[in-house]
Each structure stands twice: as structure tokens, then as C-alpha cells.
Amino acid sequence: MKSVRRRWPLVVNLRHLIIALTTSSAVVSLLATFYASYKVQRQQLIAQSLESNLAYANKLASSTDDYFKGVLQQMAYAASQVAPALNDTRRVDAEARRLHLQTDSLNSVVIADSAGRVLADSPPQLNLRGSLLHTPQATQALEAAGPRVSAPYLAPSGNMLVLVSQPIVAADGARKGVILGAIYLRQQSALNKLLGTHYYHDGSYLYVVDRERRILYHPETQRVGSVMGINPAADRIVQGVSGSEVLVNSRGVEMVAGYSIVPTTGWGIVVQRPLSATLAPIGALMRQVMEWTLPLAAVALLLVWAFALKIASPLHALAATAASYRPGESDARLRSISSWYLEAAQLKKAMLRGLGVFDGNLRRLQKDAATDPLTGLGNRRQFDFSLAVLTEGETPFCVVLLDIDFFKQVNDRFGHNAGDAHLRQLAGLMAEGLRPEDLACRIGGEEFALLLPGTALTEAVAIAESLRRRAAESAAPDGQAGTLSLGVAEWQGPDDDVEAVLRTADERLYAAKAQGRNRVVFG
Ligand SMILES: Nc1nc2c(ncn2[C@@H]2O[C@H](COP(=O)(O)OP(=O)(O)OP(=O)(O)O)[C@@H](O)[C@H]2O)c(=O)[nH]1
């Protein structure tokens, strides 16, 4: 198969190039602006969310800390009240009830002696009075030297709770017993209220874990008491570190999280918001950026276009002039081009210079192509061309054909150069007194013609006669009088055959020769 070599269009139009370049650069810079703006907005939204979540977590950690300090303080006061009167059943009972009911800090209260026997409980439905404390958490509280908050556990009553305890110590420092307060984690409690009121509703939530990753508070209450799965925030809390970060939670959702440690308990409060909710406003922000940027970008693009086209305009005009050369017109067109910057001006100047040389050469060539080199008269080509112009323009004319008499003898006797000088002298005689519209030509060796547009036959005969006389009277360079024989014919319009008219003029020229030469024949 014959392979076809494709020629790629390497030459492109400057205006198209400018439009393509400016448009593409505007689109690219617009996209870059949008992308940069998107990145900045995204970072800002995430940074704001991290900051506000950490602030929330810190605030809640501080409130929770205050809550526990308050509870422990209340219990310390109660312990100081019952320490000297543990045998006074009514008093111990009243103190347990007061501690339980005065605030809603504790869901239940138990007061036990140093042997772990329950002396009083509130609410009475607990029905623990007289029984021995037996759960590990209660036993640990009984043995603890100071106030204590237990890890969460499932009590025999079925409640998930943490146990807050305060030892009862006599004035002499003797250990007399313990006050226990229970905070139910899955039911209404002051702690739940404290944490729950800060819950907000765009998919954001908070949860609380202890140092063993056990969940103490969670909006999904069934998760309370379970151990937190893989979660970087829980890892930080285990390490006792507060902070904020974007993380993937135990359910695989990207979250913007802030976490803070409660000093009293070592618990960690984690406030987190889905990344998708954090970034939700970005669409509106980007639309706003677009609304502000697009009109400005369009104006900038139009200005760049206009300026680039203004730069291209002289080059375009110069190229168009160069592509369509018209003799005589191109120069004026070139001069009319406003070349308002240096490079275009230099190009225009160079083109004008080139065009000047080209026009001069062309004129010279045209002249040479239509001129007889020996005599400077029009040549055969010029004669034929002028005949065609006259007949096409239907301009009546007369033609005079003439021939030097016995010219061969001149050459033979005086040489070819003398013959040439004779021919040049005749040319001079022919050109004398011609009107601008008349044409004198050398159409053969020593054959000449006059074309006389808009001239009647009688007038043409007079012109021919004048020429004959002047030739006969002038002394040729060889010293001889070079007489002429002339034949005149008239073309009156399109009805006349131009070839027949020329033949007639030629026949009349030969008739002049035949009649003895040195004469004009016209009829
Ligand atoms: N010097 C010179 N002679 C030329 C040129 N062209 C033609 N001739 C000569 O012109 C002469 C023409 O001669 P002919 O046409 O035979 O006749 P004639 O001698 O002019 O005689 P008649 O025309 O009958 O009067 C020839 O000798 C040509 O060589 C030219 O350019 N220069």
C-alpha cells in the first residue's frame, strides 16, 4: 500500500493563536484560583472545626471535673456529719437521704461501717440496710484511703454505674466507714444531663471514655460500658493527652475531633463532627468565590483579548497586504497600516522598502517586455496589446505602417551599425509631436507602425505625410536621406475586422513602394 505523508498545518493564524492562548491561560488561572481557594477554604473550615471541638471538649472536661469535685465535696461534708454519730441510725439515715435528695448529683447513696455493713441507703428501694457490701468496686472503696471514682461496671441491680466514694474518718483519724454514691450511666443522671446538653445536631456528637477505653457516655446508650474499638482519639486519652485532629472513627467515618482529659477521673471527653458536615458550607463558599471571580475574570479576559488583538492587528494587516500584492495599491495600503509599536513599525518600514524595490523592478521589467531595445519605441508585443485595448474598448483608430526605402543598401554600404543609427533616428522622428495617447512601435526589422486612437483617416494621413516629409528632409547619419513608404488604414468600430484593417495598411504600404516609394497611400 502506498504510504501517504500527511503535512501538518504548522502555520496558524495569529489571531486564533492569541485567542486560544489567552482563553486557555485565563481558564487555567481561573481553575488554579478555584483550586487554591477550595484548598484554603477547606483548611480553614477544618481548622475552625478542630478549634471549636477542642474548645467544647475542654469546657465539658472542666464542667465534668467541677461536677465530680462538687460531688466529692458534698460527700466529704456528709462523711464529717456522720463520723461522730454512726450509731445514731436516724441521723445516718437522714444524712444518706439528704445527700441523695438535696441535689440530683447521685442516683443512690449508701453509708456503711468499717466492716462493710450498710447502715443507711437512699432511695429505700435499694433495700440494702443490714447487708454486707460485696461487689469488688464497693470493697475497693471501703479499703481506699481517700475519695475515689470507680471504673464503670454492671451492678447486681442491672445498672451500669460508676461508684463515687468518700471514707468516713473519726477526729482521731480512725477509719469508721464509707459513703458510696452511684451515678447511673444509662439512665437520667446529672452527669448525663451535663454531657447531653452540649449535644448538637448536624451529625456531631460527643462521647466519654476512661483510660481503659470503656465508654462512659455515648448518645447511643447501648454502647455505654463497651470498650471503644480502633480510634486514635481513644488512644490519645489512654496516653492522657488532650488535643484535636482529623481521624477515622471506629465505624470508618472521617471525623474532625477535639478531646480533653477530665483531671479528677482521667476520663477523656471527645467532641467530634463528621468531616462531610464540616465541609458542607464549602459548596456555597465556592459558589460565592465563583460569583465574585467570574465577572472579574471575564473582564480581564476581554481586556487581554482586546490588547492582544490590538498587538496582532498591525501584524495581521501587514501579513494580509503581503499575501495579496496589488501593483500600485499595496504601497498605499501598507502606508495606511497603523504600526503603533516599534517591531511592527520596523516590519512596515522593511516591507515598504522591499515593495519599493519590487515595484521598481516590476515596472522596469514591464517596460522592458514592451519596449524595443534598439529604438526605445514600443515593440510588437506592445503594439498587439494596444490594438487589443483599443478594439475591446471600441475606440476607433487609424494605423500607419511604414518602412524605410532601400534600407538594405544602407546596411550594405555603411554597415550594420550605421543601419542601427538610422533606425534610431527614425524612431526619434516618429516620437516627435505624438499625443500622449498615440503609440509609435517598431514591429519588425525596419518596419514601424503608428497607432492613432480617436483619429480620423484624413488627420492620420496628415500625420503620416508630416513624418514622410520630415524623414525625407532630414539627413540620416550615413549622409543619405532615408525616405519612407507609408500605408494608412482606419478601424471605425467593432463592425470592422482588425486583421483586415492591418492587411489593408500593409497592402497600402506595398502599394507606396510599388508606386515609387517616398509616399503615403491611404485609399
Ligand atoms: N542595421 C539593421 N538592419 C536591419 C535590422 N533589421 C533588418 N535590417 C535590414 O533591413 C533590410 C531590409 O531590406 P529589405 O526589406 O529587403 O528591402 P529594402 O532594402 O528596405 O528595400 P525596400 O523595402 O524594397 O525599399 C535588410 O538588409 C535587413 O538586414 C536591424 O535591426 N538593423
Image (tube, helix red, strand yellow):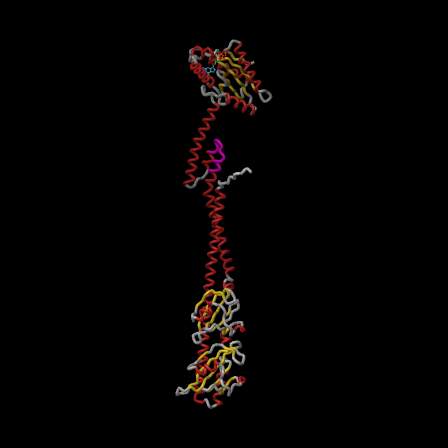
- Which region is colored magenta? 318-330
Residue 68 colored in magenta in the image: no
Residue furthest out toward the left:
172
**Number of numbered discs visible in the structure rendering:** 0
Residue 324 colored in magenta in the image: yes
Residue 378 location in percent, x, y?
48, 21
Question: Which corner quadrant holds the N terminus?
Answer: top right
Q: Pick the residue in front: 490 or 205.
A: 205
Residue furthest out toward the top:
516
Can residue 380 be seen?
yes
Residue 196 location in percent, x, y?
51, 73
Q: Quadrant of residue 499?
A: top right
Residue furthest out toward the right:
495
Residue 442 location in percent, x, y?
49, 18
Residue furthest out toward the bottom:
88
Looking at the picture, does residue 13 appear above or below residue 257?
Answer: above
Residue 440 location in percent, x, y?
49, 20
Q: Pick the residue in front: 99 or 400.
A: 99
Can residue 189 be seen?
no
Looking at the picture, does residue 147 appear above or below residue 500?
Answer: below
Q: Pick the residue in front: 291 or 233.
A: 233
Question: Which corner quadrant holds the C terminus?
Answer: top right
